[in-house]
Image (tube, rainbow, N blue to C red):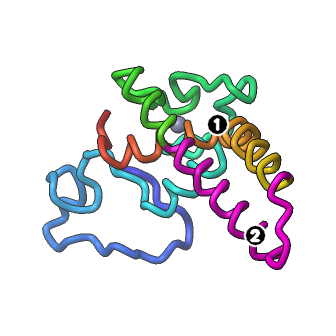
Amino acid sequence: MEPEPPGSPAAHPAPPTGDRRGNGHGPFSGTRRRPAVLALVARGLTRRCPACGHGRLFRRWFTMASVCPRCGRRLEGRAEDAFFLGAFVLNFAVTELALAVFVAVGFALTLPDPPVGWLVVGGVAVTVVVPLVFYPFSKTLWAAIDLFMRPDG
Ligand SMILES: [Zn+2]
């Protein structure tokens, strides 16, 4: 019998049979629970493990642990190439979005006479800097998507 936290109200009243857990049907059945989507997104955006929220996955900006040191969740997935491709596509999409926003805002703010040369230079800078900055976030975000698709992976 597990000790109850002192003073906590019974949020889940015990069923009248007295068999409180282990029957495979209630909130305590043994399957691994998937974190809520918002938690997955938040963990991905903050470079945390999608499964447990552990925050020390990166030894360097570009070097992510392949397995979570706390919960053991495999972060790179079974197929390394597929995982790399997923994170890459995510990073590419974010970069293109940032470039589109940059160009649109740049033109909108300078419209009678937009400095096209500077906008091109800025656009090139965006396409170089954004993927480098976003790289670790693309990895953890993809790990979160991977966990969403394969909770038991
Ligand atoms: Zn973890």
Number of the label disc, if any, that sits on residue 37: none
Task: Locate residue 24 relative to residue 150 in the image: left or right.
Answer: left
Task: Locate residue 122 relative to residue 50 in the image: left or right.
Answer: right
Residue 101 place in picture, x, y as percent: 67, 64
Question: Residue placed at 40% from the left, 21% from the top?
Answer: 81
State the image quarter where residue 109 is shown.
Answer: bottom right
* On screen, residue 27 above or below 110: above
In the image, 34 versus 97, the foreground residue is 97
Q: Which residues are magenta?
A: 90-117
State the image quarter where residue 136 is shown.
Answer: top right
- The mark lying in front, picked from 2 and 1, is 2
Residue 26 place in picture, x, y as percent: 21, 62
Question: Residue placed at 86% from the left, 62% from the top?
Answer: 115
Question: Residue placed at 53% from the left, 62% from the top?
Answer: 5
Task: Locate residue 50 relative to residue 21 in the image: left or right.
Answer: right
State the image quarter where residue 150 is shown.
Answer: top left
Number of the label disc, if any, that sits on residue 135: 1
The answer to whether residue 28 is visible is yes
- Circle 1 crowding by C-alpha within 10 Å: few under 14, some 14–19, many from 20: some
Ligand 1 under 8 Å from disc 2 Cβ: no
Number of the label disc, if any, that sits on residue 107: 2
- Circle 2 crowding by C-alpha within 10 Å: few under 14, some 14–19, many from 20: some
Q: Is residue 109 magenta?
A: yes
Q: Amino acid at mark 1?
A: Tyr
Task: Locate residue 43 relative to residue 103 in the image: left or right.
Answer: left
